[in-house]
Image (cartoon, rainbow, N blue to C red):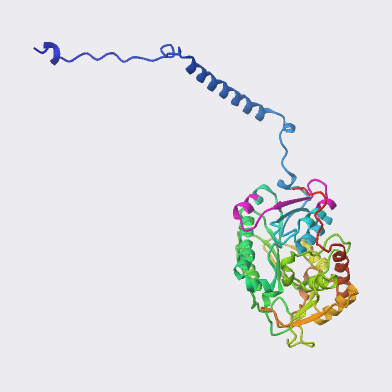
Amino acid sequence: MLPTGRGRPQPRPAPRSWSFSDMDFSDPKRNSRYLSKIIMVALLTAMCVVMLTQPPCHRKAPSVFSIHELGVTHVLVTGGAGYIGSHAALRLLKDSFRVTIVDNLSRGNIGAVKVLQNLFPDPGRLQFIHADLGDPKAVNRIFAENAFDAVMHFAAVAYVGESTLEPLRYYHNITANTLVVLEAMATHNVKTLIYSSTCATYGEPEKMPITEETPQFPINPYGKAKKMAEDIILDFSKLRKSDMSVMILRYFNVIGSDPEGRLGEAPPPELREHGRISGACFDAALGIIPGLKVKGTDYETADGTCVRDYIDVTDLVDAHVKALNKAERGKVGIYNVGTGRGRSVMEFVEACKKATGVDIKVDYFPRRPGDYAEVYSNPARINRELNWTAQHTELQESLRVAWTWQKKHRSGYADSGRYIF
């Protein structure tokens, strides 16, 4: 028989209130865990209080490169380990600018950076950052951690012949990387850009000399990539909110080196074939190669060889510094940087023979793909607006200065001296 009380409702037990006194702390392991947590929280709190209340002198001071300093202009030099970029960095440092070099060293020389570091060892003058402009996150971080006032954008692959063999590389390296730099400038409110462009954007003009109004119809990927980069810069600068100061320098064939013999041109050995004619002349004079290869003798010029406007690197960097000093917010300047005088390849070879004192053997070959017959500038605008005129216009003298450096650096920059990251 079932219990008669089953159908009756059973009274519920009263809810039990919990307090710390009711909790069981008899387990020593549990006790130890609670105590450890309490001690850790106390220690962290104490550390935070100490860090926040200590005098400023005990805190790590920010880098001088990360702050804007009255009377000091901080310039980012992309490609500053390269031939032209290193000479520009040298000039900026001599003129008391603060300089940050960013270079991935694919074409640049760490030896050039070492020379600059040894010449300007004082804190806050020069820093080198090894980075690739093709990495937007790295570029954005560099801009976030540094207080740049201006950018001189040199970094680029720059061989006409190579560009015809590797066009996609040129569009990535020149056009896309310039976009990365410009986006970082916009994000971090850097308003001044000095852009390293080229006469290759003009292609083969119908009339000589070339002015800044000459139509741009580049005929090789190098020139096309540079023109695309120019177009991007110009389009962005037209936006009222950008308020950019832009200087675009289209320069011609660069020769020479630092007159005091501190810097020179040292392309990687595998690229000598694509390099400047001056490098090939010096290699032939040094016996590194058996002779000089002149490519193309059937152009419609006086002696059948290409005619070019050769600009000394010292004059070129002077133009960059004058452009920087003249840059104005909301304005764009476009300038040809050349001597205004064309010299044929054969004239160049004869000047190189005299400069080196070596009777260089010359071999003749068919034209190089993407080359054009005659290019020289009309520098009237830059003469007038920036008060700039090429001073080192004697071809033989520019080659003699460069030859002096080459003789002492047969293998390029010696990997010696103190290097500071």
Extent of the magenta region: 116-141
Would residue 92 appear left or right of 205 to someone viewing this image?
A: right
Q: Position of residue 315 (x, y in %)?
A: 82, 68
Q: Nearer the viewer, residue 209 or 407?
A: 407
Q: Position of residue 87 (x, y in %)?
A: 80, 61
- The residue sitting at the left extreme is 1
Report the residue at 66% width, 60% height from top: 244
Q: Position of residue 313 (x, y in %)?
A: 81, 67
In the picture, which quadrant includes the N terminus?
Answer: top left
Whether 129 is among the magenta residues is: yes
Report the residue at 71% width, 75% height from top: 212
Placement of 51 over or under 165, stated as above or below: above
Would residue 314 appear left or right of 170 to someone viewing this image?
A: right
Q: Position of residue 130 (x, y in %)?
A: 69, 53
- Total numbered circles: 0
Would residue 33 appear left or right of 231 to someone viewing this image?
A: left
Quarter of the image for residue 252 reads: bottom right
Quarter of the image for residue 219 reads: bottom right
Q: Nearer the viewer, residue 86 or 388?
A: 86
Placement of 164 over or under 406, stated as above or below: below
Would residue 143 appear left or right of 93 to someone viewing this image?
A: left
Q: Is residue 165 visible?
A: yes
Whether 69 is among the magenta residues is: no
Q: Is residue 344 visible?
A: no
Placement of 213 over or under 122, stated as above or below: below
Quarter of the image for residue 311 reads: bottom right
